Amino acid sequence: MHRTIVSAAVASIAGLCTMAGNVIRVNQAGYLEDDMKVAVMLMSEAVDSETVKNVENFKITDAASGRERIVDAVKVTEPWAPSAMSLRIDFSSVTEPGEYYITALGTRSGKIRIGNDVYAGAQEIPLYYMRQQRCGYNPSLGDSCHCHDGRLVLSGKDDGRYVDVVGGWHDASDYLQYLTTSGNAVYQMLFAYRQTPGVWGDSFNDRGERGANGVPDILDESRWGLQWMMKMNPADSLFLNQIADDRDHRFAGLPADDPVDYGWGAGKERPVYPCSGKPYGLESNYNDSKGLASSVGKFCSSFALGAEVFAGIDAEFATELRRRSANAYEVAKAHPGACQTAPCVSPYYYEEDNWADDMELAAMEMYRATGERGYLKDAVDYGRQEPVTPWMGADSAHHYQWYPFVNLGHAWLAMEKDMRVREEFLRNIRSGLQRVKDRAGNNAFSHGIPFIWCSNNLTVAFITQAMLYRELSGDNSFREIETAMRDWLFGVNPWGKCMIVGLPADGDFPTDPHSALTNLEKIQVTGGLVDGPVYGNIFKSLRGVHLRNADRYAAFQNDIVVYHDDYADYSTNEPTMDGTASMTFFLGKLASAGNKKDDEKHDM
């Protein structure tokens, strides 16, 4: 899933077909008791303003008692094609736990859950997918894969030398592995645990097998990633960036059966690429690397936060992580610039252009670990180089051009005691949120995220930033769009599609994702966040993308944006490891609403 994307278009007006009938989209997971609660109605025919103003036409009913009440408000929005009219139906005043449904102009919604426990356990669901993505020993399959990894390439005199880098996670439904996404996944899970430590369960051991081991499962998974990252840093002067390349795409079977021959025998060693500060590639295609900081900065921040979290669990492990984080910081600082992944037979790779955000986060973690003010100064200086993550408010971007999609360094700086620093970075966070809100305008779903490849990952990043801003500032200006983007992931979107496999269990979630586990073995890739909708021009331009089945969402597609629950559409329906890991923060926060053991006043 590593191909270049350049997209355009912001409107969603022109339709491909005429929508038959009206539909009401609701969050299929549910609403917290004090949530802003909004359903979206898409209508095949417009009605007059008097009909909309007559609130008697819009009621919410308690499914158990049959009690009806009028909804709070109905707002006409820009029509989302192919609908002729779109409405936002507000029922926020309904706070009593229970199950409900809305009736509007003769149309009835699906089940609506309300309660502070509706997300209880949801925070654990992404970890199922992470365990399924494990490389080396895979507990979901009870088998091992890629046990010969790997041999160095593009490493000068070390070319062909064996390095043990077995472990980590497969990036997506192919079996490539990247420091870029894995380092972010590790940090996101550690951060999620750090912010809501009381909500995480212990049902699996460190091998990913069922059975408690006295350590929260999210930390078992984080440690799996950290141990792999340590292997990817085999010497203080050597940082590795990638295992395998797009030659792997020749195989679409189960990981243990991978027969791809990279020159050392079928199914044997795979190439291991070092972090490089200059463009490289094994064949005619080259990336545009300019430094090491983006990748080595990720080593630093994950090692540093790992040292903090594991200090009370495994002191020896934490001490080594702390030592490595300090070394990685110095290497990254000495080599500014972005380190990109490597293309091979195709001109596709992660085109990460920014790096100051990685260094800002690394510097903040070093400051938090040591208390040395020089690191804080570095963090502020790096943060000022990129006040707003550039995708926010934009219509287009190259693939993973601005990554990670959320800058958690800003959040740490916004927690600082120095009020000038705190206020400056709160303003930066707010500015990014405002740009997305402005872009959403008056569309039915309050959706301002660009429909570039992996748009759902950007949506998770937005939710994370909005939650952090609201908690740190007390400002509720973005609460509606924060909730709308959460609801988008759980079915309040044109297709009525929940974007996380298996969540909720009775929801309309992807059943035909781009995954060999599902395609060949009918194994549900529970917890996987799929890429999400893309601009139509992206879907049409990518090599090999097609539909192998009839599109059951055809009535809701338009000329601008599409989504397909179809194995052959890897552009919208492929789960990704990093997007999935990034959900742990916001799901942990939602779960904490129903978990009174969690200290909601935990010092961030």
Image (cartoon, grey):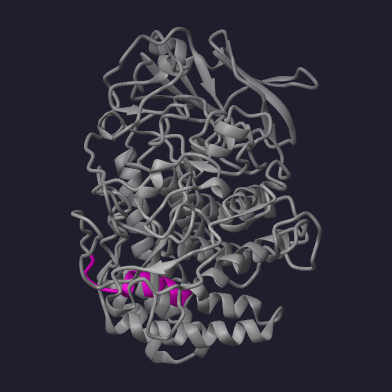
Query: Based on the displayed image, in which of its 4 quarters is residue 312 positioned?
Result: bottom right
In this image, 67 relative to 188: left or right? right
Query: Which quarter shows the C terminus?
Result: bottom right
Q: Is residue 527 left or right of residue 576?
A: right
Q: Nearer the viewer, residue 94 or 237?
A: 237
Q: Which residue sits at x=60%, y=19%? A: 109
**On screen, 274 above or below 180?**
below
Image vertical order of residue 20 relative to residue 356, above or below: above
Q: Main secondary structure of the magenta part?
A: helix
The structure residue drawn at horizontal position 28% and vertical position 22%, both measured from the top left corner, is 559
Q: Is residue 410 visible?
A: no
**Residue at horizontal 42 percent and vertical 77 percent from the top:** 362
Give the image location of residue 341, x and y in percent: 32, 60
Q: Is residue 299 magenta?
A: yes
Residue at 38 percent across and 67 percent down: it is 241
Q: Which residues are magenta?
A: 289-301
Q: Is residue 252 above or below residue 168?
A: above
In the shown orientation, is residue 322 left or right of residue 19?
right
Q: Is residue 24 magenta?
A: no
Res 335 quadrant in image: bottom left
Residue lying at the far left in this picture: please name it. Answer: 284
Classify residue 487 as left or right of residue 533.
right
Q: Position of residue 64 (x, y in %)?
A: 80, 22
